[in-house]
Amino acid sequence: MRAPGVFDTLSGLLAEQAGFEAVFLSGSALAWSHLGRPDIGLMSASETATILARLCDRIGIPVLVDADSGFGNAIQVARTVRQFEAAGAAAIQIEDQAEIKSPGAPLGRPLISLGAMVGKLKAAQDARRHDDTLISARTDAASSLGFDDALRRAVAYAEAGADLIFVESLAEPDQVQRLVDELGGVRPLVHNILAGGTSPLTSAAAAREAGFSLVLFPGAVIQATAHAGQTALQALAAGVPFAGPTLDRSALNAAIEGPAFLAAAAGYAG
């Protein structure tokens, strides 16, 4: 399955209309679009839950939501899971990065202990009200401790009951093979595809062939949106009519199914 990263209701609706079977509410995309800041843990659980609820109310396909580190310790993770599940999440991704980033290296990836992450995963499972709400465990250990530690953590997270396993920052074909050999038959595996990323797998087809069940494209939509918006605004600021590809007002209204919505609303008129 493929899931593009989305950041609001419109991007999620367009993804559904494009034929995707699921979407990923990306933490990075939320930070970029809603705060205009890097993804360093500035979004709160309540802010994310509000955006998630609007998205799930509008679309009918499953939403995997990025819960970062769970927004706190294991008890807070339990509360986050209940919030996100109530908002409509089909799956909730929790990572083993430390919640608080160092001011000197906010883009670093310091980790919590393996034991602390296992505790978070157990709390997440105990908190969910529906067994079909999936808990995805992400490890960033490959970036800071090396792949061997990342694989060790991934195995532990699977043993702790995580429904999906995501090892971030795979960089070599051998790492992909070792991960799939170790866990491919145990849990569905998640893979990230990023422009300029380190993975040797650069397409959904290649990832599926390698043994991954879910392929995320977290940055594709927000990056394309930002580029198009920047181009249009620079043209307008320069006094040049914007002639790039665009949806006119009628086409945009059609994309959000405005005519059908308004027709239904008219049926309630007194």
Image: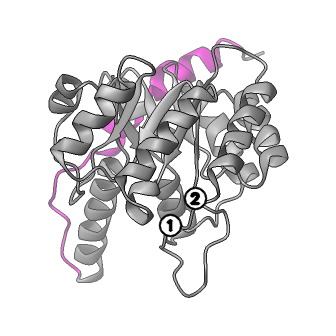
Q: Which mark is residue 235?
A: none
Q: CA distance from mark 2 to mark 1?
A: 6 Å
Q: What secondary structure is found at the residue carrying circle 2?
A: loop
Q: Which mark is residue 97?
A: 2
Q: Quadrant of the C terminus?
A: top right
Task: Please tell me whether residue 253 belongs to the stretch shown in magenta.
Answer: yes
Mark earlier in primary sequence (2, 1): 2
Q: Residue at x 52, y 72 (%)?
A: 37
Percent x, y of residue 228 = 26, 60
User: Which residue in the structure is indicated by mark 1?
Assistant: 109
| Highlighted range, magenta | 239-268
Q: Residue at x 64, y 30 (%)?
A: 160
Task: Please tell me whether residue 180 belongs to the stretch shown in magenta.
Answer: no
Vertical placement of residue 78 versus 108, above or below: above
- The residue lying toward the viewer, choosing from 214 and 256, is 214
Colour convention of the picture: one colour
Residue closest to the far bottom: 104
